[in-house]
Image (cartoon, rainbow, N blue to C red):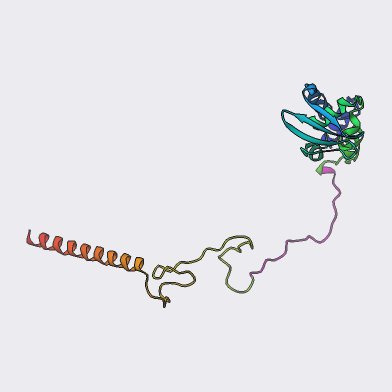
Amino acid sequence: MKRFNKKRNLVNTWNDALVPIAKNHLNDIAKNLGEYEVTRSCENQAEVKYKGTRWEVNLDERKCSCRAWQVRGRPCVHAAAFIAFIRDANRDKYVDPYFTIEKFKAAYAFQIAPMPGQDQWTQKDGEKIYPPIIKRPPGRPRKNRIKSSDESKKRHKCPRCGEYGHREKTCKNPASQSSDQSETSTSKRKRGNNTKSQGGSGVSGSI
C-alpha cells in the first residue's frame, strides 16, 4: 500500500508522455548520430552503416537487425539515426506503450484497502482447526534421490576386464593385461610387506 501510494505521488511530478528512463534513453542515443550513414530504400525502411557494419531498420515494424529494439522496446541507435535522417520530431511514437505515463498510472491504479490492528479483529467462536495428522507411508524410506531425466548416469567399470555393466565378482570375461599387471604388482607389494614384518620381528626377538 505504501509502495503504490509512493508511485502514484511520483507520477504526478512527471509532465512528459514517457517515463524518465525511456526519455533519458532517447536523449542519450541522439548524440553523435552524424557518424552513421543512412541509405533509404523506401519510406520507412533503410540501411544504416557505421564503421563497415550495416544494419537493416524498419520503422513500420519497429525492427532492427541488431534486435535491441525488439528486445528492449526502445529504439536502438541505428533506428535513432534513421529517425533523425527523416527529421521526425515525434520520437515518442517509436517507443513501446509500456514506457508511457498512461501505462504507468494503470499499473498502480489498483487500490489496497487499509487493515485495522490485531486488537480490532473480529473474534469468532467455533471449532478449532488442527493440522492434519501425518502418517508414515508403508515400506522402507527412500535414501537415494530421484535423478532428473537429462542427468547423466554413472556407469561402473569392472577393474578386472575393464568393461562396463558388471562388477568384478560376477565378471566372466578374461582379465585384461593391465589388470594382470596391477594384480602382480599388488601381490609383490604384499609379499614385500610380509617379509619386512617378519624380518623386523626376528631382530626384535634377538635383541
In this view of the protein, which residue sits in the foreground, 9 or 155?
155
Q: Residue at x 63, y 69 (%)?
A: 136
Q: Which residue is drawn at 47% across and 72% down?
A: 166
In this view of the protein, which residue sits in the foreground, 115 or 166?
166
The N terminus lies in quadrant? top right
The C terminus lies in quadrant? bottom left
User: Residue 64 location, x and y as percent?
Assistant: 81, 37
Determine the residue located farthest toward the left in the rendered image: 206
| Left or right: 164 as drawn, with respect to 70 | left
Where residue 183 sits, quadrant-wise, is bottom left
Tally of marks: 0
Residue 130 among magenta residues: yes
In the image, residue 190 sits, relative to residue 68, either above or below, namely below
Segment colored magenta: 119-136
In this view of the protein, which residue sits in the foreground, 162 or 202?
162
User: Residue 80 location, x and y as percent?
Assistant: 83, 28
User: Residue 83 location, x and y as percent?
Assistant: 87, 28
Q: Which residue is drawn at 78% across and 37% down?
A: 68
In the image, residue 46 sits, relative to residue 138, either above or below, namely above
Q: Which residue is drawn at 89% across and 28% down?
A: 91
Residue 122 among magenta residues: yes
In the image, residue 4 sits, relative to residue 191, either above or below, namely above
Main structural element of the magenta stretch: helix, strand or loop?
A: loop
Where residue 96 sits, quadrant-wise, is top right
User: Residue 164 location, x and y as percent?
Assistant: 48, 69
| Left or right: 186 as drawn, with respect to 165 | left
